[in-house]
Image: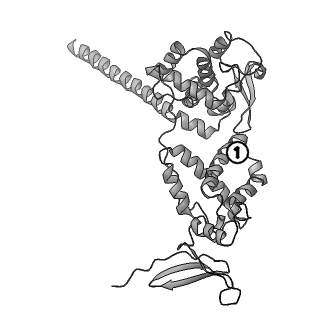
Amino acid sequence: MLQKRRLRAAVELPRGIHKVRSRGREYYYWHPGRGTVHAGQPIRLPDNPQSPDFWYALRQAQGITSQIAGDTLADVVQAYKKNQKYLNLSRGSKEQYDQALKTACAAWGALPAKGIRPVHVQTLMDGLSATPGKANTFLGGLRALNAWALSRGLLDQSITQGVAPYPKTGGHKPWTPTQINAAKSKLTGMVRRGVMLYLYTGQRGSDVVMLGPTMVDDGGFSLRQRKTGRDVWCPILPDLAAEMATWDLVPGPYLRQPNGKPYTRKRFSLHFDEARSKIPELAGATLHGLRSTAVINLRRSGLSTAQISDCIGMSIAMIERYCRFADKKTSGKAALINLQERAKNKIVKRLENSKTKDK
């Protein structure tokens, strides 16, 4: 029976590495000057030159102990963050990419970038399977780094090829009327105030926590969105205006923590989670779901997708995605009413015909 040969992609090995084949296996040694009077003792390396462990062991054998030696993944990341393409990203995108690249550097930062392979990225993705959103954000940041580094020869092959993101499960669901009524009647203090700002402006959490009296401009909020850098004029709807009339006016954002400091998005989310856990009707409701709720409410009020895009600062494609279920439901109800009216007319017509025959 012939032994199945294991195939590996070719990897260019630096001078000084000696490969030995014995009994169908390959062994690698760091042995510079082999065959000369200057040769030292060979140092055994891991068996797989495609593994980051192989390259790390090689660097150790070469006496290179510094984590920054010019060709590590950390070096590539550092160079990427200095290039104009990265610098032109919005603040929100930079934060997401930074978190992804931080995760990558924690795993492989000290290893040569050219030793990283898709299998290593997939292994890390598998480890993040419990949080698919976080895993997909990580993959997105790594893909951006991969594309930039490949075109500059800093990688010898794609490190994300074949690695697929986790499928989306429908995203954050819009709030139901029952949930909105429960929020209005049972939430209190700054949490209630924040939910109202989310509901009536449709802004992201990073922008909601920044809203304040100084942003009010001619009946709306004039702001620059943190994630996109887009300038938006968001109208203050009558229901929100009524809410704001009861708020105390102090310098700074509307949302303040008990210690008087402005909220961050994460801190407000934590306080909302605490309040939500005490209100059964809000089970499963998310703050980001209020963004789609605001879009749907504006659509039902008769605004076009282009008008909603201007008001909220959202792409038309995303607005249509948020409204797809609401539009189908509205159309379905209209169709039901139409069918009921037709059936009713048929019954009336039959009764009228029967009366004519009796005469």
Evaluate whether residue 188 shows in this view.
Answer: yes
Q: Which residue has dot 1 on it?
A: 94
Label 1 sits on a secondary structure element that is: helix
Q: Residues within 10 Å of mark 1 (few under 14, many from 20)?
A: some
Tally of marks = 1
Give the residue at x 33% y 20%.
344
When asked about the image quadrant of residue 65, the answer is bottom right
Q: Position of residue 265 (x, y in %)?
A: 64, 30
Please state the horizontal and vertical placement of residue 160, each as a whole percent of the image. Answer: 58, 60
Residue drawn at the location 49% of the way across and 30% of the way down: 326
Residue for point 51% across, 45% down: 132
* Residue located 45% across and 26% down the image: 283
155 relative position to 290: left or right: right
**Relative to 324, 232 lies left or right:** right
Q: Position of residue 54 (x, y in %)?
A: 58, 69
Q: Toward which corner of the image does residue 198 lie, by quadrant?
A: top right
Q: On the rendered structure, is 54 left or right of 254? A: left
Camera-side residue of 337 and 226: 226
- Residue sitting at the far top: 246
Does residue 164 appear anywhere in the picture?
no
Q: Tell me the kind of residue under disc 1.
A: Lys
259 vs 89: above or below: above
Q: Is residue 65 above or below residue 25?
A: above
